[in-house]
Structure formats: C-alpha cells, structure tokens
Amino acid sequence: MQDTSPPPTERHILSTFEEIRSGVIDIAAKAKRSMTIMTADLEPGIYDSDEFLEVVKRLVLAKRYARIRVLVTDPARTVRAGNSFVKLGRRLNTYIDFRNLRESYRKEVHSAYIIADDQAILYRVNGRGYDGIMGFGEAPVAQQYLKEFEQPWVDSAFSEDIRRAHT
C-alpha cells in the first residue's frame, strides 16, 4: 500500500550567500513538474551557477510538461549583468518563461523566492539580502506565495528585453 500522507515539514534558517545558493539548488532539485521564481535580477552566482543550471536541465529534459516561470523585479540590472540562466532559457523556451515585473508592482514587491511544485519554498523578505527561510513539505506556505505570484505574472509583459540582451 502506497503512503499518501504529505511529506514531513522541514525548515531551515539561512543567512549567508552560500546558504541561499545551496538552498536554491536544493529547492530546485525537489521540483518534479514546476518551479516558480521571483527574483530582483536573477542574482549572479545563484541562478546562473552550474549546479542550478544542471538541475534545471534535468527537470526540463526529463519531463515534457515541466514549466519554469521567472518574474524579474529589476530587469535593467539583469540585462546589464548577463546571466547563463537566461541563455539556457532561450534554448529551452518552451519550458522556461521570463517576464519583467510590471512597473506598477515594483514598489510593492521586495521579496525573493523559489517554489518547487507547491511543496517546497525558499523565501526572503528582502530579495537583496541573504536572510531567509527554506521549507520542505510546506504546501500551505508555497500555495500562498503561488497565489500571490499569479496576478503579477499575468499582468507582466513577456520579457523580450531579457532574452534579446543575451543573443
């Protein structure tokens, strides 16, 4: 008989760049069908690390229905800095979607997070800092942030300028 109980809740407090980087990779590795990312500028060293990119490639190449949505709150900085995740997204554009957060939301949104499916989340109140909470088996919390993500995602324009900057 298969166990259908939810996974146990597990939480970790993070406070350094390395912990955030490692936590993002851990959360991404939990994804079986989707990743949802809210980030200021795709955070160099985190979302363009080789380890993170390998996890993304494994997900999208193993699952035809996989989907990764990325909402960037400071697109000008992303375009200036360049990012390997964006380059990968250009090649795998049926799986990875980037959008710039609509201007009207930018004063309201300061957090950053990555959500795997609707079960695991790494959340930072200040997306420019490294203090955060990572949780596994956190369906109610992950679903709350997915719900909050949805309207800005729908309202935000397709981010052609991010993709174009890396051709």
Image (cartoon, rainbow, N blue to C red):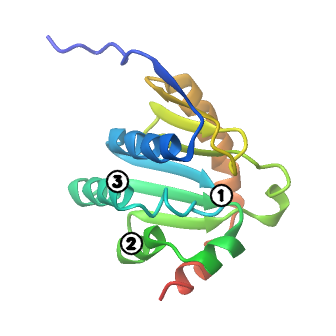
Per the model, the C-alpha gap separating discs 2 and 3 is 15 Å
Labelled disc at residue 88: 2
User: Which residue type carries mark 2?
Assistant: Leu
Mark 2 neighbour density, 10 Å: few (under 14) some (14–19) many (20 or more): some
User: Which residue type carries mark 1?
Assistant: Val
Instruction: From the image, state whether disc 2 or disc 3 is nearer to you.
Output: 2
Per the model, the C-alpha gap separating discs 1 and 2 is 23 Å
Locate the N terminus and report the quarter of the image it occupies: top left
Mark 1 neighbour density, 10 Å: few (under 14) some (14–19) many (20 or more): few
What secondary structure is marked by label 1? helix
| Of the image marks 3 and 1, the number of the one nearer the N terminus | 3
Q: Nearer the viewer, residue 40 or 4?
A: 40
Instruction: From the image, state whether disc 3 or disc 1 is nearer to you.
Output: 3
What secondary structure is marked by label 3? loop
**In the visual, does 137 lie left or right of 125?**
left
Q: Which residue is painted at 50% across and 22% down in the image?
A: 11
Q: Relative to 24, is 13 above or below?
A: above
User: Which residue type carries mark 3?
Assistant: Ala
Residue 3's x, y, as percent? 23, 13
Residue that carries the numbered disc 1 in the rendered image: 154
Residue that carries the numbered disc 3 in the rendered image: 66
Q: Relative to 109, is 131 above or below?
A: above
